[in-house]
């Protein structure tokens, strides 16, 4: 029996990408503090840990189903480490069965923690948690395979919105409209990251039946659709400020427009050029993280 080192299991989760979830949790905590809720360290710690576990499980499950479809094996144009998966299965670091068991074990481990958090904060958390977990699973898992049906961006927006809303609910014990708007604004930016990452993978996706938006309509739609994500995020933030659900200082989060402009410039320059795509991917990720971090900071301080 071959014993797999813990470092390999950790690397299989693609930990660098978990930062988007860490920022989402920070946004939920920051909103709760801004609303005047006393911050519970232990509830926050459990929320952070298991939100990261859920995201890690979704990453591993995504690798498993992309291996089953042959997508990752066929992807010769991937841009590591951003697209094309971990390739642990293709490089024979893990088997398909090991990857599947690991991914589902991570997702299942979230359930008892979620039940405990429901008991601490309220029954309303149950629906939030189940919806977020479902979207993370359904994004790539059979039979739904939402990404392959052009619905991946919707699933991702909802999943990360639920992380923000759920984190806030754990601390406050009730719904918060500001958390829903913050979660929607941030979720749109996370969805934009996944959307842009589809560009270099488009030929492998098409060859294996993954009908993503980029496959369906071509990479030429990327600049305009990405602009729409940014506009939607800005609109939601503006609505929250106008109705005094967020302070005017929240406008500081729009400093993230800097890397967003660089991402869009790369896309409009040549959406099929690998150098420009790499710039767009990096700047899109930076925009997402910078927006979330700045918004959380203004709410806290």
Image (spheres, rainbow, N blue to C red):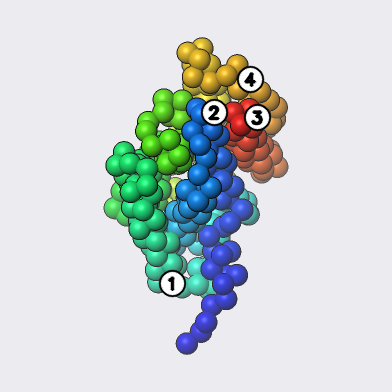
Q: Which residue is mark 1?
A: 98
Gap in angstroms between the C-alphas marked 1 and 2: 43 Å
Along the polypeptide, which appears first: circle 3 or circle 2? 2
202 lies above or below 217: below
Kind of element beneath mark 3? loop
Q: In x, y percent, where is residue 299? A: 59, 28
Mark 2 or mark 4, whichever is nearer to me = 2
Gap in angstroms between the C-alphas marked 1 and 4: 48 Å
Q: In x, y percent, where is residue 24? A: 53, 40
Q: Is residue 45 left or right of residue 153?
A: right
Q: In x, y percent, where is residue 60? A: 47, 60
Gap in angstroms between the C-alphas marked 3 and 1: 45 Å
Image quadrant assignment for residue 268: top right
Quarter of the image that includes the C terminus: top right
Give the number of the disc on residue 292.
Answer: none
Q: Is residue 144 visible?
A: yes
Q: Residue at x 58, y 64 (%)?
A: 11
278 lies above or below 10: above
Along the polypeptide, which appears first: circle 1 or circle 4? 1
Q: Is residue 84 left or right of residue 57?
A: right
Q: In x, y percent, where is residue 197? A: 55, 43
Q: Residue furthest front?
A: 38
Q: Residue at x 56, y 65 (%)?
A: 10
Mark 1 or mark 2, whichever is nearer to me = 2
Q: Say whether marks 3 and 1 touch (CB < 8 Å).
A: no
Q: Which residue is mark 2?
A: 34
Give the number of the disc on residue 249.
Answer: 4
Along the polypeptide, which appears first: circle 1 or circle 2? 2
């Amino acid at each position: 029996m071959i014993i797999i080192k813990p470092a390999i299991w950790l690397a299989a989760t693609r930990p660098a990408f978990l930062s988007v979830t860490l920022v989402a949790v920070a946004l939920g905590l920051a909103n709760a503090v801004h609303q005047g809720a006393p911050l519970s360290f232990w509830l926050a710690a459990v929320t952070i840990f298991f939100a990261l576990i859920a995201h890690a499980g979704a990453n591993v499950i995504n690798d498993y189903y992309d291996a089953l479809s042959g997508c990752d094996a066929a992807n010769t144009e991937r841009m590591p480490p951003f697209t094309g998966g971990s390739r642990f299965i293709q490089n024979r670091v893990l088997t398909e069965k090991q990857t599947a068991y690991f991914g589902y074990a991570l997702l299942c481990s979230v359930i008892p923690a979620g039940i405990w958090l429901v008991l601490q904060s309220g029954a309303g958390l149950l629906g939030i948690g189940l919806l977020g977990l479902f979207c993370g699973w359904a994004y790539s898992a059979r039979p739904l395979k939402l990404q392959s049906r052009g619905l991946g961006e919707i699933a991702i927006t909802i999943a990360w919105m639920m992380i923000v809303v759920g984190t806030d609910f754990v601390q406050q014990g009730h719904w918060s409209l500001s958390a829903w708007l913050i979660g929607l604004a941030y979720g749109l930016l996370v969805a934009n990251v996944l959307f842009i990452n589809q560009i270099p993978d488009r030929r492998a996706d098409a060859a294996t039946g993954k009908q993503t938006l980029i496959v369906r309509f071509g990479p030429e739609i990327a600049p305009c659709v990405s602009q729409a994500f940014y506009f939607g995020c800005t609109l939601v933030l503006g609505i929250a400020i106008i109705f005094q659900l967020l302070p005017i200082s929240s406008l500081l989060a729009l400093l993230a427009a800097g890397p967003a402009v660089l991402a869009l410039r790369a896309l409009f320059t040549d959406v099929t050029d690998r150098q420009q795509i790499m710039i767009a991917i990096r700047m899109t990720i930076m925009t997402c993280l910078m927006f979330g971090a700045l918004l959380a900071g203004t709410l806290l301080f």
